[in-house]
Amino acid sequence: MSDLLQHLRERKLVQWALAYAAFAFALLQGLDIVAQQFGWADGVRRGITIALVIGFFVTLVLAWYHGERGAQRVSGVELGILTLLLAIGGGLLWRFALTVNASERSTSATTSSTTAPSTAGAHADDKSIAVLPFENLSDEKANAYFAEGMQDEILTRLAKIGTLRVISRTSTQQFASHPGNLPEIALKLGVATILEGSVQKVGNTVRINVQLIRALGDEHLWAETYDRTLEDIFAVQGEVAGTIADKLGAALSADARKQVDEVTTRNAAASDAYLRGLSLLRQGYSVAQETAAIHAFEDAVKADAHFAAAWARLARGYSHLIFMGTDNSPERAAAAKHALETAEQLQPDTLETLAARAYYIFRVQGDYEEARKRFEVLHARWPNDVDVMLTLSYVLTRQGHQPEADAMVAQALTLDPLNVQVHKLRAFNASYERQFDEVIAQTHAVLALAPADAEARPIEAVAWLARGELERAAQLLGPAPTLLSEENERPHYIELERLQRSYATSIARLGQMLDTPDPQAGPLDALSVRVELADMQRLAGDRAAQANYIGVRDALREMLRHKPDDPFLLSGTVAVEAGLGNEKASFAALDALHRKTSERKDVLVDRATLEQRARLLARFGHKDEAIAGLRYLLGVPYGAPYNPITPATLRLDPDFDTLRDDPEFQKLVQDPQAAKGGS
């Protein structure tokens, strides 16, 4: 053994091994960059890695036989020990190479808060599945909605099986119906199996082809063709979902089996309308899109008044229109209640009906506590439904349970890893907690998935604003809005220009917006811009602010006669009364706003109202109370509505100029603990 060690030292075998490992590591890192730039296939990169592993053995053998003492005869013991050392070293390098290769394949995801599942390909759970878009083989291409609805309904039934992990449709819809790179898709989605399908609709008959494939090795596990009429279409969907569960060894509870096998209607017209509605819902949200989906579900219940699932979807659609403020009329509220109660009378225990009740409680009644309980029960019984998870996260955030809300969003990302909206939600939640590194990471994840996304860069810009890095924020914002109806980036520009104290720039831009005709703008759009203009004029010392404030106040008073509890109108009243210097009236309006918004027990809204109060207190000279309020707000998560206050914004915001000389305020803006968001 001592002779062998002497030989190793003389031939510098250890030095050669370390030098080669360092060279291989550096080369792989460099090739990783080149491969990503030029889109090299995985096979090329694997071939290079294997060549480097072989080169390790060759290098050590050459080093042994051509060392300082030249070629020598090696004893049997030396040869055995040397072989063992080479095997161990080669094995370690091979393991390293596999790790690097896996890292290369998974770089599509994100950052420190990675969103792609850690399991993929051969390492994915065997009971994981993604359902790719079904191909429309109908001669009438207008029947594409039918194929989309079929895919969605099968996916919905699979999602009810708690022993499966089912990827959401949002993450699968970007892929082709029968792609040639199934292993790569499975890797991105973190699943072991893929379901492909096609649908051909001719009159009242439908042919459905489905095949279940194990992605690694492209192994076909099961395939079937179903020829059915529209009356039997929902029976097929349950049969497909149940068969897949059996093929993947996913046990079904009695409740899950009942939910999966449910035949919701045997009416052909109702089935067709219902699938049309599902397809419309999955094409992205807009008022027009949702309204069209609601009309489709209305057609479904007209065709079959006992179609409980369609009534449940109607209730959810009506509730969402109310929640978004699109139509919160008494007639719409009555329609939502009627649709919900009809679904409950027909099928009270289905997950669709239970979901409709939960969404109604949340969106229409505004009872967060009861909604949370309902959605927790739903999540336990419907663990693959991402919409349920995200709504539950929303409720938890507004109840002040931010860690639980964050965990729910993270869980949703494992089922919907390519959904940019989930990444944005994670960014918003991080901003509430002043975790601006995470906000930036999530916006980069969005851009990696959707480079043309219009919201990602403004979201990142707001994070830089919160850190006080105004130039960097300005670089990320898009063109300044020129029309009243272009409200997406207007608040960001107002905040930027306030912190920059670029009042003249704002005044000119807002004045031009008011002078530019905009058929898409409503009266509230004009009022919002007039308040912003008056605020900038006041800060600039422009006397024109007074007339603008008075004009807006008169308009708001008229509107409040008809809607005395409208939060938007009350918030505007706070701003104009404060701008006019009416302390008592501004606090009275703020108290009315707080009473209205506190009905939902929403901590984010409540804390945003407390920030408004702190601003009023500072403006009207109540320094101690203002500083106490700011001290509290710096320690809690919230959004107002985009970011909470930070030490950086306190240093820059003109609303707090009255507090600049106060030692307690100076402590706030310099407190490292308060600056945990990176300011």
Image (tube, rainbow, N blue to C red):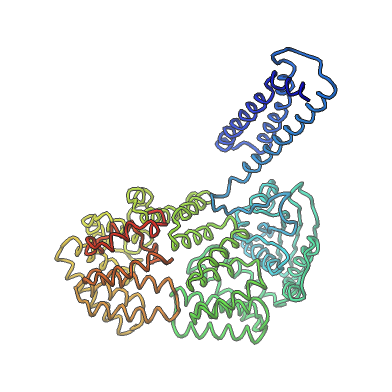
- Judge by depth and name the residue closer to the eye, 140 or 120: 120
Q: Position of residue 427 (x, y in %)?
A: 48, 58
Q: On the picture, is 449 further left or further right than 266?
A: left
The correct choice, above or below, for 11 with respect to 104 in the image is: above
Quarter of the C terminus within the rendering? bottom left
Asked if residue 298 can be seen in this view, the reply is no
Locate residue 205: give its quadrant: bottom right
For this rendering, which residue is in front, 52 or 317? 52
In the rendered view, tell whether residue 663 sits above or below residue 179.
below
Q: Is residue 441 left or right of residue 1?
A: left
Between 494 and 224, the one nearer to me in the picture = 494
Question: How many marks can you see?
Answer: 0
Residue 466: give x, y in percent of width and height.
37, 57
Percent x, y of residue 234: 72, 72
Residue placed at 32% from the left, 68% from the top?
Answer: 525
Q: Residue at x 73, y 49 (%)?
A: 122
For the N terminus, give its image quadrant.
top right
Q: Residue 587: where, in percent of width, then height? A: 27, 78
Residue in the foreground of this view, choosing between 492 and 314? 492
When asked about the image quadrant of residue 256, the answer is bottom right
Report which quarter residue 139 is drawn in.
bottom right
- Can residue 254 be seen from the camera position used here? yes
